[in-house]
Image: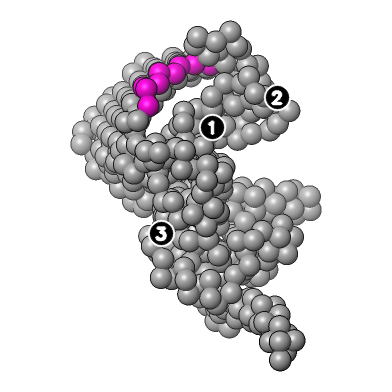
Amino acid sequence: MRGANQLCIINYSMGAPIVTYLLLLSLSLYGYGHTNTVVPVPEDSTSTSPSGGKAISINVGLNMAMRGFNRFILKDEYARINLSSMGDNLKTRPVWDTNRFSTNFIGHSYHGSMYFNSARANGLDLYQSSVVTAAGSLMWEYLMETKPPSRNDLWATTAGGTALGEALFRFSDLILDNRATGLERVGRELLAGILAPTRLITRLTTGEAWKTGRFKGNILYASPYSLELYFGETTTGVADRDLNLWRSAMGTELQYGELFETIVEKPYEWFRLAGEAHIGNGCFRLSQVNTIGLLFNKELFHNNETWVTAGLFQHFNYYDLNRVLNKDGVIPLYLSEAASIGPGIIIQKRKNRRKAQIEVHLSGIILGAGTSDHFKLEDRDYNFGSGFSLKLYSSLEFKQKLTISLFSENYLLFSWKGVDDYEVLEHLTINEIDFLNVQGDKSSSRLCLLGLNMKYRLNERTHIILKARHLTRDTTYKYFPNVNYSSNELFFGIGMNV
């Protein structure tokens, strides 16, 4: 009997996960029986036929593929899901997890952008796609892991995924061209697929990825844009330390849409997207990602020289700066504004081939994060928080030759639920760590980035760039001494307009 019982236990332990996996995998077929397809015409056209079922099926398949990779390739324990683990998670309130900064604030946001773009590529609008993104995140958190659901992942995947998703979807729409053939076509499809992988999946399933025609075949109406690629060298000096970090840097900046000379009718018909990576100290690291997207606006004033407009903006900011891979390196400066929204006003004046612009943005941060000097638990060395941000931008352009920009980004983050006894952390079991559910140190942190950017145009497509940035962090802890930290960065390089 004992042997029979053991055999039953073995069969159940092996069979339940397989049955669960096949059950969820079968859900990914939902929607493929539908006949509605998306005609690649501008989104305002009534001939676009939304297909929510197909978007859902792609997202379920995406979750199952990632879960299978984690389970069978990486052999992660948390991917050993079964019906029992799903039931437990459905009865568990979300917690603050202990994953690393990059996983929580860029990995989950990019994952969310894939959910989002499966919906956008199948004809849904921004708000409908946000609902699909939230559904994909809920499925992952409650059904695809044995660990308890994570509240920070739910926010970062949904809100961050929406911000990145819409920007990357519109970016990919600029790249795709159904008129192209050969290697150019392959390159365009692959590049757009990196930006929006689930859009590539959709194009493969509909055959759009290889069909050619007389028209470009965009889903969106063509919008004016400026795209810049740049590379150069950056050096960082840390206050009170005899340390200078030299690294190579490469990045891109995209400004999409015209705010003052065209009517902005839909969310993200005007946005900015920027990203930068550092190469040095033996690694390649994404150091920052920034987006600001206009949800809706109202023109306040307009004459021949001056435009004033106010609106509601969605913000996404990710900074992972000053990191080196040695024990004598500097403290990393983390900053995340993953879920954030607020009002802003933009003023522009043009006269005699000169253009000046001023922006003021105030936002409420639902989910953010910043560096911790004390909290260290598994992969987490930062504090979750919520709060506010105030951003000021100004620029002055002379005869389309020289552009000088000044900016100030100010963030105030509060960590409400903190640890008061750090000795306890050393003796926690894995299960106790999973359910610890704290934001980190109980603290308030003010982070400020002050910067000066200068661009001088050499010819139609090339310019030189000089950037200077000062970063400060003032953190007030309840149970520890306060910490003040500052550093300076200087970048010199060359940029190209694409």
The reply to whether the C-beta atoms of the residues labelled 2 and 1 are less than 8 Å apart is no
**Amino acid at pointer 2:** Asn
Residue displayed at 71% across by 57% down = 74
Which of the numbered marks, if any, corresponds to residue 281?
A: 2
Residue with the mark numbered 3 = 94
**Mark in front: 2 vs 3:** 3
Q: Residue furthest right?
A: 182
Bounds of the magenta span?
A: 480-492
Q: Residue at x 46, y 65 (%)?
A: 138
Q: Amino acid at mark 1?
A: Asp
Task: Please rate how many residues cluster around mark 2, counting C-alpha atoms within 10 Å: few if below 14, some from 14 to 19, many from 20.
Answer: some
Give amino acid for label 3. Answer: Pro
x and y, in percent, of residue 48 in the image = 47, 68
Query: Disc 2 and disc 1: Cα gap in Å?
Result: 15 Å
227 or 331, nearer to the observer: 331
Q: Quarter-wise, where is residue 364 in the image?
A: top left
Query: Is 401 included in the stretch rendered in magenta?
Result: no
Element marked by disc 1: strand
The residue where tag 1 is placed is: 320
For disc 1, the neighbor class at 10 Å (few under 14, some 14 to 19, many from 20) is many
